[in-house]
Each structure stands twice: as C-alpha cells, then as structure tokens.
Amino acid sequence: RVIVHLLSGDRPDPLYDYQSIQTELELFSPTLLNKPQIVVFNKMDMPEAQEKWPEIKAHFESQNIPIMSITAAQGRSKETRTLIQRLMEEDTKEKNRLKLEEEVERAKRGEESKTKLKTQPKRTVVKPFEIEQLDKKI
C-alpha cells in the first residue's frame, strides 16, 4: 500500500538509484507510481551520507515526496520507530482513501453502503453549579 524507497547513503549517486527504481516500477506496472511513497535515506552514521543528505533532502522535498534519514547503527532506534510510525500513518491514509473510493463507486451503482456508521456513546451532561460559602461554623 505504501512504497518505501530505501536509498543507501554510501552509494555514489542515490538520486540515480531512485530514478532507476522509479523506471522499473513504471515498466512493471504504471499504477505503482500512483501509490504513496516514502524515501528513506540510510547510513546517516557515515560521513559520505551526511555530506549527501542536504542535496537529497532538498530534491525530494521540492517534489513533495516524504523523506527521512535513518541509520541502523546501534543506539539509534528512535529513527527506526519514527519510520515505522510514518509507514503506519501512510498505510492508514491509503486504507481510508481506498474505502472512500469503494463507497463512492458503490453509491454510483446505487448499491447500499457496506460501511457501518459508528455512533458515539451517550454522554452524561453535568450542568454548571455554584458553591456557596456558609457563614456557620461546623
């Protein structure tokens, strides 16, 4: 549902690698290019990857393609958790988009919706009240 491009920061030309993968996807099935994509730039613990990062990041941001950098080096698990979280978010967005498209098509055909509306549980409303101080000592 989400295509993740893992670009290796130690490769001579990561942008060329990305373009090669995009070409292969298009040749295999052009519809794959319509799927949400995230680019993950790996090996940020290496100096050559750190040098390339600003250019790589700017390139993808200029195309509105989500990009993040990670490293698999020990002690850097926060970046991996962030990646997993972003993937889950993208997957949820894609699922919701597909469900909506399915519902629209079903409505166009005059079919009944398969989506059940979730109702909110009844809530107890507490009315505002005032507290008065009594002059009597207890």
Image (spheres, rainbow, N blue to C red):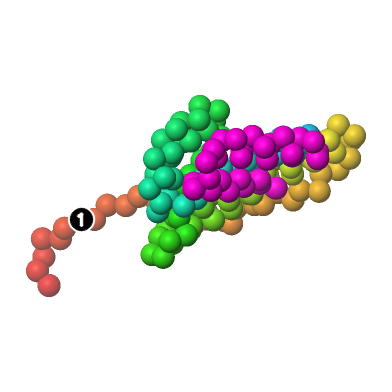
Q: Is residue 71 left or right of residue 88?
A: left
Q: Picture coordinates of residue 76 (x, y %)?
A: 40, 60
Q: Picture coordinates of residue 24 (x, y %)?
A: 74, 39
Magenta segment includes 47: no
Report the residue at 54% width, 38% height from top: 13
Which quadrant is the C terminus positioned in? bottom left
Q: Nearer the viewer, residue 58 or 85?
A: 58
Report the residue at 83% width, 35% height from top: 105
Amino acid on which disc 1 is placed:
Glu
Q: Nearer the viewer, residue 19 or 81?
A: 19
Whether residue 16 can be seen here: yes
Whether residue 89 can be seen here: no
Report the residue at 70% width, 47% height from top: 1
Establish if 124 lies above or below 105.
Answer: below
Q: Picture coordinates of residue 74 (x, y %)?
A: 41, 65
Residue at mark 1: 132
First to last magenta residue range: 1-29
Crowdedness near tag 1: few (<14), some (14–19) or many (≥20) residues, C-alpha within 10 Å: few
Res. 94 image quadrant: top right
Q: Nearer the viewer, residue 94 or 58?
A: 58
Report the residue at 81% width, 40% height from top: 28
Which secondary structure, mark 1? loop
Establish if 92 lies above or below 105.
Answer: below
Q: Nearer the viewer, residue 42 or 136?
A: 42
